[in-house]
Amino acid sequence: MEPFDEALDRRIWSLAATRLQWQKRISETRRRLPLEIETMILELMEEQKAAEAEETASLQEEIGFDQVEGDMGQSTMLTLSRSVSLTMV
């Protein structure tokens, strides 16, 4: 019969406990991280839409475009404001 090595036994149990802690940390991260990423992407998309709308509005004001409603009630084309007259040649 081999003698019992108490130091080795402690080391093995210590490594097992460490492995369990890491597995728990990894599983928590795997649950939490996708939700954080989804939230961040949705917020960024909304910020981008708002910035694009703001930029479009400022450009339209700068150029002098007005929106005209189409048959379906949708904005279908932009026309120049009254300050610019077009003539066909």
Image (cartoon, rainbow, N blue to C red):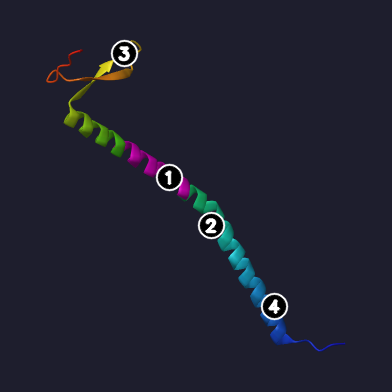
Position of the N terminus by quadrant: bottom right
The residue type indicated by label 1 comes to Ile
Mark sitting earlier along the chain (3/1): 1
Mark 4 and mark 1 residues within 8 Å of each other at the beta carbon? no
Query: Relative to 23, does residue 86 appear above or below in the rendering?
Result: above
The one of 15 and 72 positioned closer to us in this rendering = 72
Q: Is residue 2 left or right of residue 56?
A: right
Question: Is-magenta flag for residue 45?
Answer: yes
Mark sitting earlier along the chain (3/2): 2
For disc 3, the marked residue is 70
**Residue 41: which numbered mark, if any?**
1
Query: Relative to 48, does residue 19 appear above or below in the rendering?
Result: below
Residue 23: image x %, image y %? 61, 63
Front of the two marks 4 and 1: 1
Q: What residue sits 16% from the left and 20% below the top?
A: 81
Residue at the far left in the pictured view: 83
Mark sitting earlier along the chain (2/4): 4
Local secondary structure at mark 3: loop
Residue at the far top in the pictured view: 71
Mark sitting earlier along the chain (3/4): 4
The residue type indicated by label 4 comes to Ile
The residue type indicated by label 3 comes to Gly
CA distance for labels 2 and 1: 18 Å
Q: In which quarter of the image is residue 6?
A: bottom right
CA distance for labels 2 and 4: 26 Å
Residue 37: image x %, image y %? 46, 49
For disc 4, the marked residue is 12
